[in-house]
Amino acid sequence: EAFYSVGIFVFKDAFREPDYSGFCLFDEEFPIVFVNNSAAKTRQSFTLVHELAHLLFHTSGIDTYRNEYVEELPLKERRIEVFCNKFTAEFLAPEREFERAMGGLGVSEETAHILASHFRVSREFVYRRFLDRGLIDENTYSEATSRWTNQIRGGDGGNPYWTKIAYLGREYIHIALRQYHQNRINESQLAEYLGSKPRHLSTLTDYFERSAV
């Protein structure tokens, strides 16, 4: 809701490529953030803040676990990406608080789990902090994060209508339905905008109205 209130639309989907957590596309009128719903909720929080930082720069961006991605960017884009990572890290777990929480804990996966629970961030986030501090090397970081992201995620996705509403967001669906009811788009166009079939629109609309109660 906070993003919608400032004109940023957030969408979700289950990405086929687990190395990518999300991306944003900057546009003066319709900036969007797309989040990989297959990622852990803590990782999704990181992605939202990271992509917000990109939009503040009026740039598009990608959030990925691939550490080499940053090194492959042109200098200007690389500086923006590094800043966005630092902005997100400070927003979610301020350096001073992170230092205090770590205390006398050693550098280990167990410590990463403890700190991740404390700050409600991902273990990958904590390991990135370890890497930036020189507490672990690149291989240790890559091996751990690759293993964590490849863990099997259960669940069948639940009710498809609730999933659709969660993926598209209430604000986007509201705008699409408003355009339809004002006869600015027809039923086929509405179905296309909502990624649905015309015969399912009535049920989807019913679920949408129930979600507002």
Image: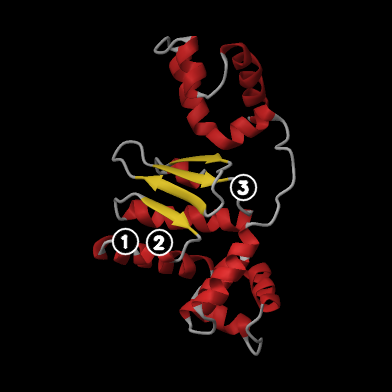
Residue type at the position of mark 2: Tyr
Q: Amino acid at mark 3?
A: Ser
Residue type at mark 1: give it: Leu
Q: Is residue 32 above or below residue 212?
A: below
Q: Which mark is residue 73?
A: 1
Seen in the image, is 110 located left or right of residue 142? right
Residue shown at 50% from the left, 76% from the top: 138
Query: Of the residues under marks 1 and 3, which one precedes in the sequence?
Result: 3
Residue linked to disc 3: 38
Q: Secondary structure at mark 2?
A: helix
Give the crowd class for mark 3: few <14, some 14-19, many >=20 residues within 10 Å: many
Residue 211 x/y as whole percent: 66, 30
Residue contact at pointers 2 and 1, CB within 8 angstroms = yes
Q: Where's residue 102, x and y in %?
A: 62, 83
Cα distance in 3D space between marks 2 and 3: 21 Å
Q: Quadrant of the C terminus?
A: top right
Q: Is residue 101 above or below residue 85?
A: below
Disc 2 or 3, which lies upstream in sequence? 3
The answer, for residue 145, to whether it is visible in the render is yes
Say which residue label 2 marks: 69
